[in-house]
Amino acid sequence: MVITVKFFASVREALGASSESLAVPDGVATVGALREHLAARGEQWAQALGHPALRMAYNQVMCGADTALADGAEVAFFPPVTGG
């Protein structure tokens, strides 16, 4: 399965990329597993994606770690946003 992964705000800045097309390996079936897979790429990835308040969206809808992945999906990672 191939998905699009998007990174926003400080996550994008930390990783130096705004998006990538990713062939998801076998065993990565949820958004949470995808996050763990990406974090395993190295320290920079682990720090960018390891914040406990990191937000996730699946096809532009906020989601939890247990959301199942499907071919052609879009997953986005971004920090919590506050306004004032």
Image (spheres, rainbow, N blue to C red):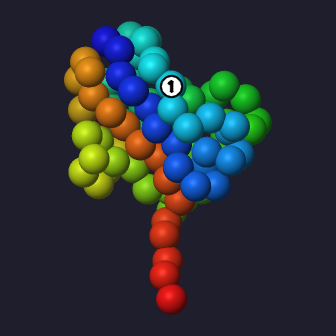
Looking at this view, is 27 or 79 the one in front? 79
Q: Give the residue at mark 1.
A: 20
**Residue at 25% over, 40% down:** 59
Task: Examine the rendered structure and indicate whether residue 24 appears above or below residue 51.
Answer: above
Place of residue 69 in the rendered image (x, y in percent of width and height, measured from the top left): 27, 28
Task: Examine the rendered structure and indicate whether residue 52 appears above or below residue 67.
Answer: below
Assign the N terminus to one quadrant of the image.
Answer: top left
> Could you tell me if residue 26 is visible in this image?
yes
Looking at this view, is 11 or 66 the one in front? 11
Dividing the picture into quadrants, the one containing residue 49 is top right
Q: Is residue 8 left or right of residue 26?
A: right
> Could you tell me if residue 50 is visible in this image?
no
Helix, strand or loop for disc 1: strand
Q: Is residue 84 left or right of residue 24?
A: right
Place of residue 79 in the rendered image (x, y in percent of width and height, measured from the top left): 53, 59
Place of residue 50 in the rendered image (x, y in percent of width and height, measured from the top left): 61, 48
**Residue at 35% over, 22% down:** 3
What number of labels is visible? Answer: 1
Which amino acid is tagged 1? Answer: Glu
Task: Examine the rendered structure and indicate whether residue 16 appears above or below residue 79.
Answer: above
Place of residue 18 in the rendered image (x, y in percent of width and height, measured from the top left): 56, 38
Residue that sits furthest to the bottom in the current view: 84
Task: Examine the rendered structure and indicate whether residue 63 appears above or below residue 27.
Answer: below
Q: Is residue 27 left or right of residue 16?
A: left
Dividing the picture into quadrants, the one containing residue 9 is bottom right
Label 1 CA crowd tier, 10 Å (few <14, some 14–19, many 20+) = few
**Residue at 69% over, 37% down:** 16
Dividing the picture into quadrants, the one containing residue 62 is bottom left
